[in-house]
Structure formats: structure tokens, C-alpha cells
């Protein structure tokens, strides 16, 4: 039975080389050490010597993280090839074939190496825009007591309206955003409302999102449109009842 994890403190370069060449397809491998990273491809870059975490995943992707921000300093996508050389420093080459891009990682010291048998499992996204629409269709009172959903993805020359419904005052066009709504969402909604109004219908429009930027809210009010605050977390609560 394959071990779930292994840990090596101050491993020899030969140990690192052997593990990267023979265990990379089986484990998520992490190196923590002092390193310099050179990138050549569609552009070029140098990340000077600093302590970083380098992660190698079984699908071939490689990520180099510093102590700040979400995104890695450097990375290569899945299906990248890894080659290791030993000299005064440990040299790790990570190559992507198409388009050709190469990371050269130079490590004078590796503080630790870890291997973890990470399982993929199942992933369920709650609160996607599609699911937000679905929940409003099932629970129209989330918008208003008199809201009646009519059609999802209603086609217009300007795109598909997420949800078209009707209230006691006329049609209601809803544009959904799972994250903060911005100016583009308001502009898109305005195009939908103008289109239906041009056809002679009495139309209101609203943004449905967990939050909205100040500039977007200002524009929304200028166009006499509405904002309905709805959080994906609330939808998860509704679903679990």
C-alpha cells in the first residue's frame, strides 16, 4: 500500500532528484528552499534568490509560491516535463512544449521535501450564476412576493437575459452575478431593458448579486434600475433545508 505522505528534512540533492524523477506521477511533491527562477518563453523573467515553496503535481503542473498573494510567482501547466541536474546547485528544468516555455529553478539548498498522496474527490460548486437563477425560479419570493419567473436565458440581439419574469407592474429583467457586480453588468442590463421597452413593453430591470461596486450602484440608480442582494451562501442554506 502506498504511503499517504513522506517528509525529508534537509534532503541531499540526489534524494530530491530521485524522488522528482520516480515519484512525481504518484504524489504531490513540495520543495521548500532557497531558489532563483528563470523563465523563458513568450516573455522572460528572473525571480532572484529567495525562500520559496515549489509544488509539483502528478498532472505535470508546477507552481512556485512566495509569501504573498494568491497567484504563484511562476508556474507551468499540466503535461510539463521535468528534468533534474546536480552540480553546485540543484537545477530543475520544467518545460512546456507548445508553446515552448521553460522554467529553470536553481536551488543551492533544499530545507525540506514532502510527498503527499492527495486525492481528487468530488467538487460541487454552490452559488454559481446558473444555480442562483435556479434557486430564484424555485423561490421567486427571494426577489419579491409578486414575482413570477417566465423564461431563463431569454434571447435578445444583445445576448441572453438570465431570467425574465413579471410582477404586478410589468416585466422584470434580472441579470445575475455570483460575485460583486460592476459597471459592465449594469450596462448589459440596460441594453436588455431598452430592447424590451423598445418593443412597447413596460419593463423594470435588476441586478442580482451578493454585492455591487459603488460606481455600478451609482449608474444603476441613474438608469432607474434596481439591485437585489442575494448571496450564494444564502442559496446553500436554502438548499440544505
Image (cartoon, grey):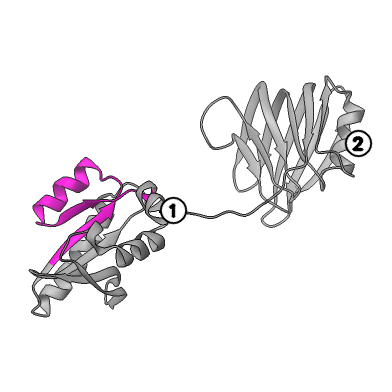
Q: Which residue is more in the foreground, 141 or 43? A: 141
Which of the numbered marks, if any, corresponds to residue 18?
A: 2
* Direction from residue 88 to residue 41 in the image, left or right: left
Contact between marks 2 and 1 (CB within 8 A): the answer is no
* Residue occupying image coordinates x 86% and y 31%: 16
* Residue occupying image coordinates x 89% and y 23%: 12
Give the quarter of the image for residue 135: bottom left
SS at mark 1 in the image: helix
SS at mark 2 in the image: helix
Magenta stretch: includes residue 54 = no
Q: Is residue 225 above or below residue 213?
A: below
Residue 40 image point, x, y percent? 67, 42
* Direction from residue 138 to residue 25 in the image, left or right: right
- State which mark lies toward you, 2 or 1: 1
* Residue occupying image coordinates x 23% and y 56%: 207
Task: Quadrant for the N terminus, please.
Answer: top right
Whichever of callouts 2 and 1 sits on the residue coming sooner in the sequence is 2
Q: Which residue is more in the foreground, 81 or 31? A: 31
Which of the numbered marks, if any, corresponds to residue 165?
A: none
Marks 2 and 1, how far apart at CA: 48 Å
Crowding at mark 1 (Cα within 10 Å: few <14, some 14-19, many 20+): few
Task: Quadrant for the C terminus, please.
Answer: bottom left
Crowding at mark 2 (Cα within 10 Å: few <14, some 14-19, many 20+): few
* Residue occupying image coordinates x 76% and y 48%: 58
Q: Which residue was labeled with disc 1?
A: 240
Q: Is residue 47 above or below residue 196?
A: above
- Point out the stretch of residues depicted in magenta: 204-232
Q: Is residue 103 above or below residue 185?
A: above
* Direction from residue 222 to residue 189 in the image, left or right: right
Residue 200 image point, x, y percent? 8, 79
Amino acid at each position: 500500500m502506498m504511503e499517504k505522505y513522506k517528509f525529508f528534512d534537509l534532503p541531499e540533492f540526489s534524494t530530491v532528484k530521485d524522488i522528482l524523477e520516480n515519484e512525481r506521477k504518484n504524489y504531490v511533491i513540495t520543495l521548500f528552499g532557497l531558489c532563483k527562477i528563470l523563465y523563458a518563453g513568450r516573455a522572460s523573467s528572473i525571480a532572484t534568490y529567495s525562500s520559496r515553496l515549489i509544488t509539483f503535481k502528478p498532472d505535470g503542473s508546477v507552481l512556485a509560491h512566495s509569501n504573498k498573494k494568491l497567484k504563484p510567482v511562476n508556474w507551468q501547466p499540466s503535461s510539463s516535463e521535468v528534468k533534474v541536474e546536480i552540480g553546485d546547485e540543484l537545477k530543475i528544468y520544467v518545460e512546456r512544449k507548445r508553446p515552448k516555455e521553460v522554467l529553470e529553478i536553481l536551488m543551492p539548498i533544499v530545507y525540506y521535501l514532502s510527498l503527499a498522496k492527495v486525492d481528487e474527490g468530488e467538487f460541487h460548486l454552490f452559488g454559481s450564476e446558473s444555480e442562483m437563477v435556479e434557486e430564484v425560479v424555485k423561490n421567486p419570493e427571494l426577489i419579491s412576493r409578486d414575482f413570477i419567473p417566465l423564461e431563463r436565458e431569454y434571447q435578445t440581439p444583445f445576448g441572453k437575459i438570465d431570467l425574465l419574469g413579471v410582477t404586478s407592474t410589468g416585466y422584470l429583467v434580472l441579470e445575475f452575478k455570483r460575485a460583486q457586480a460592476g459597471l459592465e453588468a449594469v450596462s448589459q442590463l440596460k441594453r436588455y431593458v431598452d430592447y424590451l421597452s423598445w418593443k412597447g413593453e413596460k419593463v423594470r430591470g435588476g441586478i442580482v448579486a451578493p454585492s455591487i461596486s459603488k460606481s455600478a450602484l451609482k449608474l444603476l440608480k441613474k438608469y432607474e434600475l434596481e439591485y437585489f442582494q442575494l448571496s450564494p451562501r444564502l442559496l446553500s442554506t436554502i438548499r440544505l433545508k
